[in-house]
Amino acid sequence: MMNRWHVLKRLMPLLAGMVLLLSGCGRADLSALRPQGPVAEEQFGLMKLSITIMAFVVIVVFAIALYVIIRFKRRPGDKSVPVQVEGNHKLEIIWTVIPIILLVILGVPTIKSVFGLAEDYTKDPNAIQVKVTAHQYWWEFEYPKEGVKTAQELIIPNDAVISIEAKTADVLHSFWIPSLAGKIDTNPGGNVNTMYFKAPKEGVYLGKCAELCGPSHALMDFKVKSVDRASYDRWVAAQKAPVALPADAQLADTLTTNCLSCHAIGDGTGWAPNLTGIGSRGSVAGMLVNTDDAQYANEGTVEENLEKWIKDPDKVKPGNKMGKIELSDEEVKAISKYLADLKIDY
Amino acid sequence: MSAHSHVDGQLPHEPEKATLEGRNKVLAFWLFLGGETVLFGTLFSAFLALRHQVGDGNPTSQELFQLPLVAAATFILLTSSLTSVFAIQAMHNNKVKAMINWLIVTVILGAGFLGLEIYEFYHYVHEGHGFTTSAFSSSFYTLVGFHGAHVAFGVLWIGLLIAQVFKKGLNTVTAPKIYVAGMYWHFIDVVWVFIFTVVYLMGKVG
Amino acid sequence: MGHAHEVKRYRGLMDWLTTVDHKKIGILYLIAGGFFFLIGGLEAILIRVQLWKPLNDFVSANTYNELLTMHGTTMIFLAAMPLLFALMNAVIPLQIGARDVAFPFLNSLGFWTFFFGGVLLNISWFAGGAPDAGWTSYVPLAGSTYSEGHGVDYYVIGLQIAGIGTLIGGINFLATIINMRAPGMSFMRMPMFTWTIFITSALILFAFPALTVGLVALMFDRLFDANFFNPDNGGNTVLWEHIFWIFGHPEVYILILPAFGVISEVISTFSRKRLFGYSSMVFATVLIGFLGFMVWAHHMFTTGLGPVANALFSIATMLIAVPTGIKIFNWLFTMWGGSIRFTSANLFAVGFVPTFVMGGVTGVMLASAPADFQYHDSYFVVAHFHYVIVGGLVLGIFAGLFYWWPKMFGRVLNETLGKICFWLFFIGFHLTFFVQHFLGLMGMPRRIYTYLDGLGFNNMNLISTVGAILMGLGTIAFLINVVVTSMKPRNASNDPWEDGRTLEWTIPSPAPEYNFAQTPLVRGYDAFWKEKMEGKNAMTPAEPLGPIHMPSPSILPLIMSIGLFINGFGLMYHQYLVAGLGLAITFGCMVVRSIKDDHGFHIEPDELHDKGVKA
C-alpha cells in the first residue's frame, strides 16, 4: 500500500501541472508561452527544445527512481546483505556521454540565438529607433528620429523592427514585454543596452519592470501598442502638435503651476511623464486600467483613474516621485476632465 | 605531546613543524593566504575597472604619482622581506638572539614604509585627491589602504611576537607563530609588488 | 602530568559560552541556525500571505521589500550555512577519526561571529527598517542615494561579521580534513560527506573574500561617501553585480555540495550498499566545485555583457549538468539492488533525488541565454532556485538531522512524526514552487509585492500559498518531534541504524568529549562496514590507551565577537569612539590569546572508561 501512495504523491504535483498547462498558458498579451512576435517566438522555440530534452531526463530519472523504490524496498526482518558494487564503468560512461550529447543539442541553437538576438539595429535607417529611459516607477520613450517623447505607452508600427536603446535615470530596472521579447536591464551612467523586437500583429501588449527598483516595482507596468504604419504616422504627427490649455483661465493657471512645472503636454518640456494624448492611453500611471466596464480594483474610466491618481499618487504607487499635490476636489475633477479629453485619434 | 619538552635548547631543525598544532597552523596559514589572494585580487579588479574614472578637474594618476617616493617605499619593503628571511633562517639555526634582531629590523623597515605611505596619502589629499573625489580615488585608497592596514597589522603582530620570544624563549609554541608571521610578511610584500606595477607603473604610463 | 585539574571546567550556561568542543559548537550552530530558519520561514509565510490574492494589502510595499530581502539573506547566510556548519561540526571529526577540529578556539570564534552578525542584521527590524534592496543588494538601489535609512547598513555590516565566521570555519575544516585524518584514512577512503565538506570549505575560502571586498566597497560608499558604485562620480554598478556573483554563484555550490554528501551517506546506509561509483562521485564533486567559479555571469545575461560573454557563460553553465547528472545516477544505482529501508532520514534523501533533478533541469534551461531573457527575474527563477535550495539543500539538511540526531543527542527522533514531517513538507514544497515555474513564464516578475487582478496569476498564487502553509506545518511537526524526543531516555546505541558504515557509528551516541578513546586504524573505504563484514564490531585501534590532550574552554571568542558587534554599531551610526572601542576589545582579546599559552588539559585513561561505557 505504502508504495502506491509513494507513487501517487510523487506524481501529484506533476498532474497538477498538467491540469494547469491544459487550462491555458496565460494571457496572450502577457505570457512568454504565447509569443506574438518573432523574437519571443525564437525564445519560445529554445524553451520548447530545452523543455523537451529536460522532460526526457526527468522521465528517465523518475522511472528509475520509482522502479528502484518499489523493487528494492527492504522486507521487514530482512537481514541479507546486498552485493557491494563499487561501480560500473560502462554505465558511468553512458550517463556521462548522453548528457553531453543532449547539451550539444541545446548548446548549438543557444549560441546561434545569442548572436542572432544581439544584432544591432541602432544604425538601421529602416528600424524605428526608441530610447527607453526607466524611472522610478515609469517608462519614458523617446523617438529621436521622429522627435517625439511619450511615457508609459510605446506606440510602434507593425511593419518595422523596433530598435531599443535602454538606460535608467535612477536605479536599475529591466525592460520586459513577455509576449514580444525577453528583457534587458537598464543601467545608469551611459551604459546603454540595446535590443530589438517586432510586433507584426496589431494589438496591445503588456510590459513589466523585471528588476527590483523600490516599493512600487510591482506596479511599474507599461504597454506596447502595435498599429499599422498609417496610424503610427498619424500618432507621431499628433504628438508633435501643440495642445491647447483649458479655456477656463483659472483652470489653465492651476494646471500650469501645479502640473506643467514637471509634466509636458504637446510641445512643452518637463522631466515627468509626457501627458500628450493621455486620454487615449490604455491606462493611467501604467497600471490603472482604463475601461468603461470595470471589473477589478485597478480598473475604471479614464476620468475616474485620473482622479484617483491625482488625489493621492502615493496610495496608488507607493514611493513615486510625484508626491501629493494640494488641490481641491473640484480642481482635481476639472484637471482630470481636461486630461481625459486629451485624446489622439490615430 | 607537551609543547615544552624541547625548551632546553634541543629544538628540532624546523621547530614550527615539530608539533601537530604547529603543522596545522602553518597549513591553515597557507590556506588563509589563499583567501587573502582572492581578497586582493578582487580589490585589484575593482581598481582596474575604475582607475580611469578620474572625473573632471581632479588630478590624474600621471599628475599625482611620484615614482621616486614609491620606489623608495618599494625598496624598504623588499628589504624588510629579506630581513624576515634572515630571521627565519636564524630561527632554524636556533640563534634566538639573531632572530630577534632581524625581526626588529623588519619591524623598523615596515614602520618606515608606513611612514612613507602616510606622507604620500597626506600629499595626495593636499593635491585634491581625497577619498571621496572620484571612483578612481576611492578604489585607489581602498586597495593601497588595505595593503597599508595589512602592513600596520604585521608590524604590531611581529612586535608582539618579539616581546613573547623575549619572555618565553623560542620553543615549539612560539616558533610556528614566528614562521607564519614571516609568511604573512612575504605575502604583503608580493601584494606590494603588484600594487607597484598595477597602480603606480601602469598609472604613470596611463 | 597532573594537567587535568589545572583548567577550570565550566558548567551550565558558561559551559556553552566557553566551549571549544566541536560537538557542542555543532549544537550551538543547530540552535542558532534553526532559530534563524524559523524567522526566515515566518518571513516566507508573510510573503505568501501577501500574495495569496491580487492587490492584497496585508503588508505595505515597503514592508514587503524588507521581508523578501530578509527572507533571502536570512535563509542563505543565517539558516542554511549555519545548519550545514552544524552537521559539519557534529560529524566531520567523527567521520575522519579525529578527536577535534584543527582549531577548536577558532571554531568557537567562527560560531560567535556568525551569531552576532546574524543578530546585528536582525536588529534592523527594530532600528528603523530592515534592508529592502533584495539579498543581492544591487546598486544604485542599495546605495546611499536611493536607500537612505540604515537598513542596507545593517545588511552590509551584519553580513561582513557573519562572513568572517564562515571564512574561519572554512579554513578550519580544510586544515582539519587535510591534517587530522586517522591513520589509514587516505583521501580516497574519506566518506563522501567529508569529501563534499572538503570541497565546500575550499569554495568558502575562495569565494567569501570576494564578498568581503564587495561589502567593504558598499559600506565605504554608504558610510564614507566613496564612489565605487556611484555612477554620478564614475562608479560602476555592473562591478557590484560581478563581485556579488563571483561570490554568489560558488555560494550556491557551497550550499548544495554538503547536501550531496548527506544524501550519499544516507542513501548508502539505508540501502545497505556501498556508494555506487565512489571515485566518480569524488571527481564530480571536485569538478562541480571548480566549474562553480566559472559561471557567475549567468546571473547577468540581461545586464548587457554582450553576446560573446553570454555564449561562453551559457556553455560553461550547461557543462555543470554533466557532473551533477553523474551524481544523480550514482545515487539511483546505489539504491539499485540494495535493500532500502524507508526511515524518515531516507525518505528525505530519496525525495531529494527527483526533486533536485527538477531543480537541475530548470537550471540547464536557464543556462540558455536567449531563453533566459524571458526567465530572468521572473517567478521561473524563484521556482528554480527554491527547487535547488529547498528541494535540494533543505531536504538534505532534514535527512542529515534525522540521520545524525542520535549521534548528536543520543536519542533517535520519532519516526512517525518524522514521516508526517516529510510528507507535509514534501507535498507543501511541490505545491508551493511547481506552479511558480508557470507564473514566471506567464509574465509574473519576481520581487513584486502585489499583482493586478485579471492577469491570470490568481489561482496559482493561491495554490502556492497553501503549499507554503503545509511546509510551515511540516516544520512544526519537526519541532514537536524534537521536543517529544528530548523527553525520551537517552538510549541510542553506537550504531542505531544498524547499517552504519563510517567511523562515527563506532563510538557511543552521543560521542564522548574526546570522541575516540583510541584513534582507530582505517583499513579501507566504509571503514566500519569493512570491519563488520569481517565479523568484528569495533575498529582496530591505531594507538595504545593513553592520556588524551584536550583544549581548554575559552570565553575569548564570545568577547571578540561582541567587540566586532560593537564596532559594527559604531561604524553604522558614525560613532567612531564606539567603533574604536569595539575594535580594541577584539584586538585586545587577540593579544591575550597570543600571549597566554593554552596548554589544555589531559583526560587520563582511568577516566576514559567511566565516560566511554554506556549504561
Image: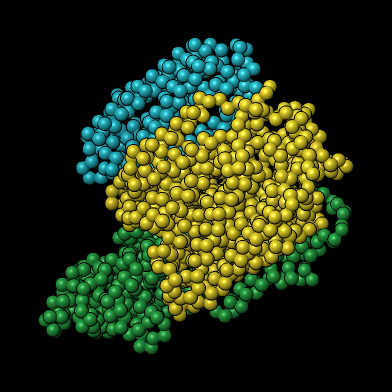
Chain colours: A green, B cyan, C yellow
Q: Is residue A322 left or right of residue B183?
A: left
Q: Is residue B131 left or right of residue C107?
A: left
Number of marks: 0
**In x, y percent, where is residue B176?**
56, 23
Q: Which residue ends up furthest to the bottom in the rendered image?
A: A293
Residue C418, by quadrant, is: bottom right
Taking the spot 68% from the left edge, 23% from the top edge, the residue there is: C2
User: Which of the image's four quarters has the C terminus of chain C?
Assistant: top right
Taking the spot 57% from the left edge, 48% from the top edge, the residue there is: C82
Q: Is residue A99 above or below residue B177?
A: below
**In x, y percent, where is residue A232?**
31, 78
Taking the spot 30% from the left edge, 83% from the top edge, the residue there is: A304
**In x, y percent, where is residue C415?**
73, 60
User: Which of the image's four quarters has the N terminus of chain C?
Assistant: top right
Q: Which residue ends up furthest to the left in the rendered image?
A: A249
Residue C509, by quadrant, is: top right
Res. B110 in view: yes
Taking the spot 31% from the left edge, 37% from the top edge, the residue there is: B206
Residue in front for this viewpoint, C78 or A242: C78
Q: Is residue C546 above or below residue C495?
A: above
Residue in front for this viewpoint, A176 or A78: A78
**In x, y percent, where is residue B55?**
25, 45
Q: Is residue B44 left or right of residue C252?
A: left
Res. C307 in view: no
Q: Is residue A195 above or below residue B123?
A: below
Residue in front for this viewpoint, C38 or A77: C38
Residue A95, by quadrant, is: bottom right
Q: Is residue C573 above or below residue A121?
A: above
Q: Is residue C77 left or right of residue B192?
A: right
